[in-house]
Amino acid sequence: MSRRNRELTTSIGCINTAGLNTTLMSTVGNHCEVWRTTRVLSRDGGALVVDRVIKCPRTLCSFPEVRVLQRDYNELRTRLRDIVPAAMFVYTSVDGIDNVLVIAETVQPWFNIANPTFEDDAVPLLHALPKARVQLQVFLEAARAWHDEGKLIDLYGLDNLVLDVDRNVRYIDSFSVFFYEDLLEMFDEPDPHLRNRMDISRRRLDYLEDLLRASA
């Protein structure tokens, strides 16, 4: 969809959204709407540009659930470092209801490397970007280690794993970054949508390993 400058009409307890200059970045994510806001602040006689995204959830999260989201994201960022944007999970009032909000470093996606549809472009592109290949290898080593622990990293989203405008590999999902595979075994008839998302994530993980080898 096209990006539009408009006011963020969501009422947020910890942010004064009145007159906040925002751009609607995405409404197609599985978990949230994504808005971008840029402000210029005066600091010590100079100017400081603050560029952040605000992720507004589609569903309600309790405080214990928010703690799990933050825990998983912290694990992701500790292992992957700059591949994962800095983000803060806030439990606040969203449209008058207590819920989670994510405020994160802005990443400008340039190329989706996790989608096999773009393989013909991705192979020569990564071949020309040695730093990105190293970053992808770090990501894959971590993803396989988590998979061995029963945690499957979410690669289902349209732009979860991308090259940004600086040609760095970035993982930009925030909500529910892991699928816990034992959850499928808890139900006689698992959610088909959940199973599909997990199957796609596994296939994309395999594809990324093939892509890394092909681009070496």
Image (tube, rainbow, N blue to C red):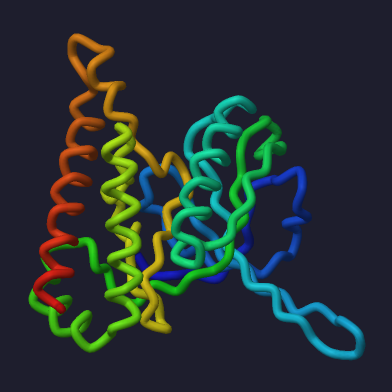
In this picture, is 173 found above or below 6? above
Task: Write the residue at 18% across / 14% down.
Answer: 189
Q: Which of the pair 63/67 is nearer the observer? A: 67
Tell me residue 194's x, y (percent): 25, 31
Which percent across, then down, holds residue 163? 34, 74
Farthest residue to the top: give it: 188
Please report the residue visible at 72 percent of the width from the left and 74 percent of the height from the top: 39
Asked which quadrant contains residue 169, the reply is: bottom left
For residue 158, what is the image quadrant? bottom left
In depth, the one of 113 and 58 nearer the eye is 113
**Looking at the picture, does residue 194 appear above or below residue 131?**
above
121 and 30: which one is in front? 121
What residue sits 17% from the left and 76% below the top? 122
Position of residue 166 in the picture relative to residue 19 (left or right): left
Closer-to-camera residue (86/46)? 86
Q: Using residue 6 as the reference point, say whether residue 144 is left or right of it.
A: left
Q: Is 131 displayed left or right of 62 in the figure?
A: left
- Can you say whether 42 is above or below 73 in the image? below
Taking the image as shown, residue 51 lies to the left or right of residue 182, namely: right
At 27% from the left and 28% from the top, the residue drawn is 181
Give the image quarter of residue 94: top right
How many dots with numbers? 0
Figure quadrant of the C terminus: bottom left
Q: Residue 32: where, in percent of width, then height? A: 46, 46
Task: Note whether 182 is above or below 89 in the view shown.
Answer: above
Residue 138: x and y in percent read 34, 63
* Image quarter (top left, top right, bottom left or bottom right) of the N terminus: bottom left
